[in-house]
Image: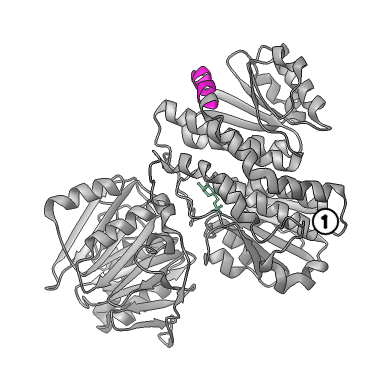
Amino acid sequence: MCGIIGYIGNDNGVDYVLGGLKNLEYRGYDSSGICIINNSSQTNLIKQVGGIDKLVQKIKITKPNGKLIIGHTRWATHGKPSTQNAHPHFNNDRSIFIVHNGIIENYLEIKSKLTSRGYKFISETDSEVIPNLVDFYYKKVNSLSRAFRMALSDLKGTYAICLVSTIEPDKIFVSRLGSPLVIGKTKDKIFVSSDPSAITNKTKTVSFLNDFDIAEVALKKIKIFNQKGNKVSSAKFETISHNDSQNNLGDWPNYMIKEINQIPEVVELAIKGRLGANHQIKLGGLDDVSTQLEHIDRIVIVGCGTSYYAGLIGEYLIEEFANIPVEVELSSEFKYKNEPISRSTCLIAISQSGETADTIAALNKVKDFGVLKLGIVNSIGSTISRMTDAGVYCHAGNERSVASTKAFIAQVTVLSLLALRLAKTRNKSVDDLMEDLLNLPDKIRKVLDQSEQIQKLVHKYIKYKNFLFIGRKYNYPIALEGALKLKEVSYVHAEGYSAGEMKHGPIALIDKSFPTIVIATKGDLYKKTISNLLEIKSRGGPIILITNFQDQKIKNMVDDIVYVPESGEETAVQIISVALQLFAYYFSLALGKNIDKPRNLAKSVTVE
Ligand code: G6P
């Protein structure tokens, strides 16, 4: 939610900042803005409702330049998307400018204190209190550095802040608490960003800030302080690897379809070096905790959105193969529950971005319980990957489409590997799953070859306003995920349900205007799911069956069938999910929606 960029360098940085903001647009895209301070301390503030392309158009007119710049792309929390609510925000005499990600929970209190001292506010945001509070303290202590620290200690909530000022036009002041910030440097430029992937085309030398760090970033020196003003350290830089080709569309019309088509390679990368043709599992990220892993007797998985659904699949996989009891909890619920947790419990946090506020809060909750904390994270170096004791990276590459596709498949692949790694006995089903995982990329390629057929199917169903997705066992979470994908990108109402629960309510919805997508794969539960299908049929509901079983008897009983390549039930999950992702994609395309950036959503939910 909201992306931040800061720049300080020897040459004009406007294009760098706009490029960085474009890369951060997935974090919010309802309004944007930049503040440029030039050599003679003149400021140029440009704000705009809408995405970065609109900001670029506006900037082209005046062609400003400067060597000290902050920029922001917003996902509105306090106040509607408007030019006044867009960042950067500034103090009353326009000498201090800030961009902020997070929520200042006590902003009303601060606002009323400042208002009583004569400060005026022009936006509805919580963020606007920050430059004014810094101003208030600056007038008392005459040091921007101290004023910034004093203001920070008054703030309650979460933040990543970049501040620039005409008072010291050679520095960016930054701080974070519960919201990510990274500093990147080259010989003559320094960048600050919410996400390293936004600046890796400029530098791969980065330093991740920790909560409560306060950095004063000047070209010659970067100093890190704690809130008391003690200099704790100079910034520690590391080199990160990052494939920048993930940050451009190439010949693809949008990121969602590009990323769906990357899935076969993503699966190959997720299993590369971890599952060999000799059927050995090696998860290097868990080596340091292998003794602790021997002793766990319960697993709690936490995640949000699509990552939560991956967790539900993980529950089936781990219970089936490793025989360890698993519970899956929404991070937003887990963090407020009084759940008994013993030291032999392992908490697994699943997150594509590694920055989701609720999942971070879930990890913080168990911080002092002495439990093993594992991460299944895609974004390398992210907060969750650094908070956990150990983990397994998804290696799906940067995911730009707000609706998660390739990262979800990678999460499920990693969970399959984890279940196999935790399995204590080696039997035929373990070997079958390993073989299936090795063959998975080619089977997914076959689903991608059916894209045109799925697009035609979408055109047939485009008139419907409601959809039900049902399945049993592994196919239940993918029914939930298939429905989520459709509603996220097309705004069409869709419900995911366990096929076994149909009779307990949802069947009341069925009539000829309410189609059901039934997911039934070859195996023990095929017949039971088909019984549910027939119950829907008898009530006049249109049916699309997605299956990997060539069952002649069913052909005339359904309206449409999508056949996917045959596999064991555990990997059918990924194969069918790709078909459902294509269904959602073509639905959104046919309705002319903003596929990569659906309304009201953001990719990285860094506020509660
Ligand atoms: C947002 C995104 C979803 C994602 C969820 C969890 O809602 O739009 O695509 O599944 O956050 O994010 P995470 O980064 O923790 O997987």
Residue 216 vs 439, above or below: the answer is: below
Q: Which residue is mark 1?
A: 324
Cβ of mark 1 under 8 A from ligand 1: no
Please name whichever residue, 453 or 294, is drawn nearer the observer in this view of the structure: 453
Residue type beneath disc 1:
Ile
Residue 378 in percent (x, y) is at 56, 57
Residue 172 occupies quadrant = bottom left
Q: Can residue 267 be spotted in the picture?
A: yes
Is residue 195 visible in the rendered image? The answer is no
Closer to us: 129 or 29 = 29
Q: How is the image coloured?
A: one colour
Whether residue 526 sits left or right of residue 231 in the image: it is right
Image coordinates for residue 227, horizontal then vertical, percent: 43, 80
Left or right? Give the position of 36 relative to 1: left
Which residue shows up at 70% across the image and 38% down it? 572
Residue range (magenta):
454-463
Q: Quadrant of residue 129?
A: bottom left
